[in-house]
Every structure is written in C-alpha cells, then in structure tokens.
Image: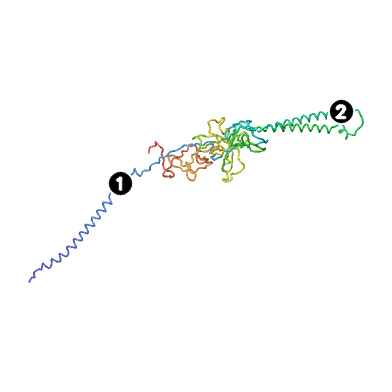
Amino acid sequence: MSHPVDETAARPERGRAGPFKTAFVSVLIVLAGIALIWLIFKTEPTATRKDASRETAMLVDVQTVERGEYRPTIEVMGRVMPAREVTLSARVSGQVIEQAESFTPGRHVSEGEPLLRIDPADYEVALEQRRSELQQALADLELEKGQQAVARQEFELLGESIPADNEALILREPQLKQAQAAVASARAAVRQAELDLARTRIRAPFPAQVLSREVTRGSQVSTGESLGRLVATDRYWVEATVPMARLQWLQFDTTPGESGAQVSLRQDNAWPAGETRIGRLGQMVGELEDSTRMARVLITVDDPLALAAAKDKPPLILGSFLSAEIQARPLSDVVRLERNLVRRENTVWVMEDRKLAIREVGIAFEDETYAYIDSGLEDGDQVITNNLSSVVKGARLRLEGDSQ
C-alpha cells in the first residue's frame, strides 16, 4: 500500500538552500570585479616626458683673464696740515704805526712783503748815537797810533838796553790794543742798532697765507709778543694712517733718485664728482697713531691752494679730511680680478670645456676693488662672472648664443 508524498513538507527544504546560493554568487561577482579593476590599473600604459628630464646647461657670462704687471692701490684717510707754519713775533718793542692791507686772515702774501711797521724813531736815534760812538773810538785809535809812533822814536833814540818784558809797555802796545777793541765794540753796537731799526718792519718770511692776526695799527707790542700766524702756500702735507701690514707695499721718498709713490686725493662731500688732486708719498713718521695704533705717513701736495700750476683744481683746506689712494709697489705675473669674483674659501669658478670647474687660488694682495692672484689661474682662463643657482663641479655650462 503506497503512501502519498507530502509536497508541502519538501518545499521548505528548497527554500532554505536558495539564500545561501545567492550570497555565494554575489561574493563571486564582487571578487571578480575587484580582480578586473586591479588588472586594468596594472596593465595601464605609463606616460614618459623625456624632454623634461633632459639635463639643461646653465647660461653663464665669462671673463678671459691674463697674467701681467699691475699696481694695486691702498685707500686711506688723511688730514690736511701745513708743511711750513710760522708764528710771527716782534723782535723789538714799540707801537705799530703801519699795517699792510694784505695782513688779513685769508689773504696771500709774497716773500719779503712788509706786513707791519713798529715806530722806528727810538731806534733811529739809537743808531745815530752808536755811529757817533764809533767815530769817537776811531779817533781815539788814531791818537793812540800817534803816541805809539812817538814812543818808538824815543826808544830808538835812547838806545838803552831795556828788558824784553818792559818793551811792550814802553811802546804802548796794551793801549793800542785797548783802542782797537773799543773800535770793534763800537762797530758791533752800530750793527746792532741797524738790526733793531730793520726789525721795526715785519716782513713775510716766505710766500704764505695769513691764518690769524693778533695786532693792528696802534697796538703796543713788546719783544717776543705774537703778531700773527702764517702758513706756506707752496706745499701742504696730508697726514694719513696706514695699517702696519701694508707698509711693505709702500714706496717712500727716501731713496736717492726715486720719488715717492703717486697718491690720488679726493673729497667727495666738497669737491665736484670725479675731481682729484695728485700728491706724492713723502716719508713715514716714526710714531704710531694713538687710538688706532696704525703707522702715520706724510703725503706731499705741491701748490695746494691752486695758485700756480694747479689752477682750476679745488684748493686744500687745512684741517679737512681727504680720501687718499696710494699706489703700491708693482706686482708682476699676477691676474687682476674683481674681488666679488673670488668666492668662498678663496675659490674661483672657471668654465673648462663647457663645464664648471672650481679653482683654489692664491691671493698676493687685495685692495678695495681687486684681488691680485699669483696662483690658480693662467692666461686664457674663462672666469665665470655671474652668480649660479646651483654650484656643482662638472655641471654643464653654455654661453649666450650657444645652441641647447
């Protein structure tokens, strides 16, 4: 006897297996999608930019150098001072009765020009008196000569033997010497009176500029009293201070046949732009400057007030400060290069075969503008004059007009 199948009991079993199958299929689909996306990115072609990665040579400017002989300059500061200065003083006393118009501060006077005159009346009287005393002494001398001649005649007539010690007394030789001495003294008195009279006129001792005047007409002056101050106009000095290490490079005016080094002087705040005066390095003062402990040197400037040969040049003013460029001794077989082209640690950038080379150089001397190089550079070397953004030895370089 067969039993009927219960279909309602079997259906729930199929219904429970369906959700698991759906989930499994969904997971497979997601995994397949992920794998497909990974494969797409993995096999995507890569873009390359060959032109951008190609090395580009740096554009530079160069200066071709040559070895030779150069004269560096040493720049210092100096103060103008007189080479000759005199304080006029009275050598006789009296009242000033004349004063020259040129004896005024700032005026120029020539050598021997009268400046002042002291009342000469007393000195003229004294001169006449001394002259009369001289005439009296001369007359006494003539009288004594006559008496000596008479004494000699008497001595010869007597013919007696007289000791030699008494012979000079009998012949009046002491009296003659006394009269001669009186004449010499009278002559000296006359000469002194003439000098005193001449000294009543005060004259300029050399071509000079009047700096000060301390008396005027009507002033009463005494011997030794100051009358004024003069400075010579033919030459001034500029006293400058130089570092001790630079003295070996200076050429002073101490060697026979050689003049001192040339010096270019300027005063930027007072003279027209580019205006200079030329001087010569004289000698070194044997004493250091107190505050800076640097050596003191004297620079000679001829015609400092531009009165003769230096016409149309600015005059020098005493006490003013000037900039001085002193020519140093010449340097032979060196390269002269602007100081800013010497890089850190005394190196220079050079272009060799269109590549950057960094050279160490030896510096013999440096002034305000240039460095003088005695080793590390040769004739024809091309020194790079501009700054570079990247400094790498062997980097490629190019000049204006070169193809990339």
Q: The disc labelled 1 sits on which kind of residue?
A: Ala
- Which residue type does callout 2 highlight? Val
Is the C-beta separation of discs 2 and 1 under 8 Å? no
Q: Secondary structure at mark 1?
A: loop
Residue 157 drawn above or below residue 298: above
User: Between residues 296 and 312, which one lies in front from this camera angle?
Assistant: 312
Look at mark 1 in the image and give the residue it sits on: 47
**CA–CA distance between discs 2 and 1?**
149 Å
Q: Is residue 390 left or right of residue 219?
A: left
Q: Which mark is residue 150?
A: 2
Q: Pointer 2: residues within 10 angstroms few (<14), some, or many (20+)?
A: few
| Number of numbered discs | 2
The local crowd at label 1, few if under 14, some if 14 to 19, many if 20 or more residues have their Cα within 10 Å, is few
In this view, 127 is above or below 33? above
Q: Which quarter of the rendered picture does the C terminus lie within? A: top left
The image shows residue 252 at horizontal and vertical percentages of: 60, 37
Of the image marks 2 and 1, the number of the one nearer the N terminus: 1
Instruction: Give the image location of residue 389, x and y in percent.
Output: 41, 44
